[in-house]
Image (spheres, helix red, strand yellow):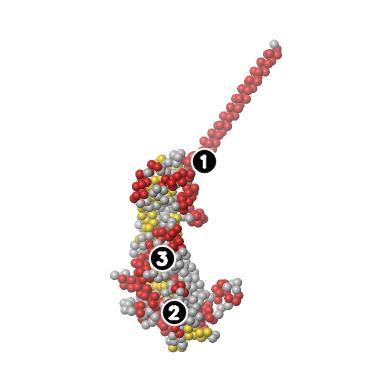
Amino acid sequence: MLELNDYKKEMKQSFILRIIISILFFVMIFCLLISRFWYLQVSSYEGFSERADRNRISVIPIAPRRGDIFDRNGEILARNYRTYTLVMSFVKANELEKVFEQLSPIITINSYNKRMIRRQLNEFGRYKPIVIHNNLNEFEASWFAVHAFKFPGLEIKSRWLREYPHGLLSAHVIGYIGRISDDDLDELNRQDKISNYRGTELIGKKGIEKTWEDVLHGHTGFKEVEVTSSGKPVRTLRSIDPIPGKDIFLSLDIGLQKVIDDAFGNRKGGVVAIDPNTGEILSLVSKPSFDPNLFINGIDLENWKLLNNSPDYPLMNRVLYGTYPIGSVYKPFVALAALELGKRTPDDRIFDPGYFECAGQKFRNPGSVSYGLVDLKKAIVVSSDTYFYSLSLDLNADELSSFVKQFGFGQITGIDLDGEKAGILPSTDWKRKKYSSNKKMQKWYLGDTISLMVGQGYNSFTLLQVCQGIATFANGGTYIKPHLAYKLRNPMSNKEEYIPYEPLYKIVLNESNCDIIKSAMVDVINHGTAKKSFLKTSYSVAGKTGTAQVFSLKGSKYRSDFIDEKLRDHALFIGFAPSENPTIAVAVFVENGGWGSKEAAPIARKIFDYWLLEKKK
């Protein structure tokens, strides 16, 4: 009996112990739950609330309207217009192929665009609208409207699309926009600008579109949209409107561009026209050209091959990127250097027998023509190579280099376009660096200097530098950076802002020396090599023709008919008008054109006629 009582007592104690342990266990669990609840609802409330909102709220960027580009007369050069676009608002990555297949009866999406769509989907998520197809025509839009129920994640939206109304006429100036590439994304990230390109597919790739990208692009807006668990938008919670890009006005005259384009025809080359008083680029033409509209939504493979593989290099801006020997148009600057540095006087004369002999080698005038007694002015008018060859005995390469450098030769001008080359302004120091691995080649010879005096040899300049040089001479030596953009306009307020361009420096020149060179250049037009092209002009022009050798004839007679076109001489002309108070300076380059007097000067005549006569009407 006693044992039974002890057993019951033990069982009771064991039961009570279990109850206590259970209660403690449940109390501990409850405490854990309370602490977890405290952590979630109090300590980490802000963080989890923000994450919940991010799951519930989608931030959709709103791309800004890109600024327009105008010429100096208000003629539109680049604009935006509304177009219908097929947009994917919420589609999962694994459903893309099915969507592409369903669209295939009416809309074909190539492999490149498919890759772009997948990349955007991975990068921005499935709630950011992604363009599937641009420029829907009426048939495509109506077909999709009828079959829209099959595509719950797709919709038709209107968007801004870029257009270049003048196409080829201003392609190398305006440039173009194109799809943002991986390299563009890396650069935007590096500059910490990527946030301003959310929702934007396009960016400036070339020309003004590239160099003025920050101004033209504007600022991205956004809207916060509440979405369902499947990603379908429910309502807009908040939005900030985008700020459109500013409009840009260029000093370019599209009418002058057309005159030059028509004058060139199918020939290759380039033209620059500058207002010598302001540094404004009035015209910049590179031939052949291309249609920038091809690049807006990604150029197709066929057109890309045609442009990229063309032997005429239409994508190359010959004015900025091409560097060439400039032949006799260099002579006014060489002559001015000789006067300014005291190497020659205007009255010093030499006898020109048709050649200059040095160390047993004869350097000849074209056609070995003899000009008899020649002073500096006559040497420019008749373009006597012999006179300028003889200057090599008095004017060395370093002295010439230091002098013409002031006019911009061999220097980056800083124009507001991309892709400018510096060219080559030869000197003894340049040659030592150029051939640093070959000591024998480092030596500077008198023959090197002789070639420089007539714009040949190692000389290699851009057409922009040549025009900048003559514009600087025309205004008396004031160096103003050449530029295109001169005014900005806020499209929201219409407030205009002029871009200031101050002279960078003034070249100290003797006025009487400049007058001698200018007088000689006027005589080139009235009595010299350009006389035929400027008959019966009602205005006065100062100019110089030039013919630049592409390869050495080694004493043989030049016959263009028997020489491959790519080896024929380049034709050049520089000048300004009116000569007494110039408002325009011009440099014309006809690639492999032959004589400057026959090919380049007539183009210059049409430029001056338009600017000084027709435009005033």
- Amino acid identity at mark 3: Ser
Give me the C-alpha separation between circle 3 and circle 1: 57 Å
Note whether residue 597 is visible.
yes
- Density class for disc 3 (Cα within 10 Å; few <14, some 14-19, many ≥20) is many
Query: Residue 469: in sight, yes or no?
Result: no
Which callout, 3 or 2, points to the residue nearer the camera? 2
Q: Residue furthest left?
A: 617
Of the 4 image quadrants, the one containing the N terminus is: top right
| Residue ID for mark 1 | 47
- Rounded to the nearest angstrom, the CA distance separating label 3 from label 2 is 29 Å
Q: Residue at x 37, y 73 (%)?
A: 603
Secondary structure, mark 1, is helix
**Three-letter residue code for mark 2:** Arg
Disc on the earlier residue, 3 or 1: 1
Query: Which label belongs to residue 289?
Result: 3
Which residue is painted at 37% across and 46% down in the image? Answer: 144
Q: Which residue is mark 2?
A: 559
The residue under the point 41% across, 63% down is 290
User: Residues under labels 1 and 2: Cα distance?
Assistant: 83 Å
Q: Secondary structure at mark 2?
A: loop
